[in-house]
Image: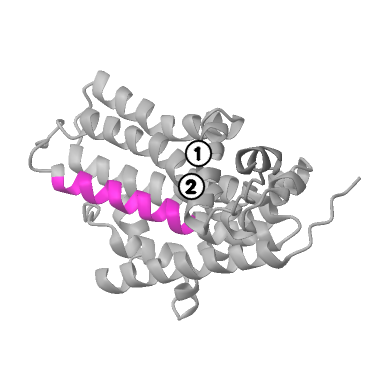
Amino acid sequence: MTSEAQRDTPVTTPPRQAPGMVAASLRVFELSLGEMLWSRRTIFMALVVGLPVVLALVIRLFNMAVDGPAVFGLIIWAFFLRFSIPVLGVFYGTSLIADEVEDKTITYLFARPIAREAVLVGKYLAYVACTVLVVLPSIILVWFLVIPMGGSLGANFLDLVKDLGIVAIGLAVYGAVFAFIGAWFKRPLLVGLVFVFGWEQIVLAFPGYLKQLSVAYYLQGLVPHAMPNDSFASMVQAIFRETPSLGSSLFWMVVIEVVFLWLAARIVASKEYVLEQ
């Protein structure tokens, strides 16, 4: 009797619990990383960071009489920190949520049993991983090509490690800022470009406290390189060389990243996204 009653009793499956914030973010990260690595934006990124590699290769093939460490420092400062990192941050960071809205796929993401914040955080982590995997190898290639021309790989290895860390920090911080812009503004790419090529360029060129409201001000405070005193690059760098200390730069970069990523997550969690027909 007992066994028959047990067979007749329907078996109920307990409802699946929604994954926690960390687990959900990692799941979104796994799904987004592959999409980003094989996207058109990654082709654009490879072309952008491939330019200094081509330049370094030309310098090496023609055996130009240059100071390798100085040239490498100039490429890091002028090309990567002042151009590539902000540009990649704009094109990737603003698209984390905006692309989903434009493609009308945001509702499918939010229909999953995970927190909305996890969608933003997971896609942001995928952005950081994708850009780091593409940008840092190009810096290493430039280093191998340029440094031996008047310099030593061993003596300059520590500067390479610092540069890789600075670039990774810059990508992460700019990505957080533009993730916030992408979540808040309706035309985030335009706002991001104005911020990078308008606001940051203007406030850094003039004395005063406004430059403290830019990411570039703190990012250049981390740069270990100084341009040769007799070069045109040194005069250009001197315009932007009013920088905070290393400790202050690191502190404020962390603050900027955490605050803007948190703000972006809060906006995504509470905003009602209206899809245009």
Looking at the rendered image, the quarter that the C terminus falls into is: top right
Q: Position of residue 85 (x, y in %)?
A: 45, 48
**Left or right: 149 in relation to 219:** left
Q: Position of residue 93 (x, y in %)?
A: 57, 51
The residue that appears at 48% across and 34% down in the rendered structure is 48
Circle 1 packing at 10 Å, graded few (<14), some (14-19), many (20+), is: some
In the image, residue 80 sits, relative to residue 274, either above or below, namely above
Mark 1: amino acid: Glu
Q: Position of residue 101 (x, y in %)?
A: 75, 48
In the image, residue 137 sits, relative to residue 223, either above or below, namely above
Q: Which residue is mark 1?
A: 30
Looking at this view, name the residue that lies furthest to the top: 61
The residue that appears at 29% across and 32% down in the rendered structure is 142
**Left or right: 205 in relation to 76:** right
Q: Are marks 1 and 2 in contact (CB under 8 Å)?
A: yes
Q: Which residue is mark 2?
A: 26
The residue that appears at 43% across and 51% down in the rendered structure is 171
Q: Secondary structure at mark 1?
A: helix
Over which residues does the magenta segment extend?
158-174
In the image, residue 273 sits, relative to residue 72, either above or below, namely below
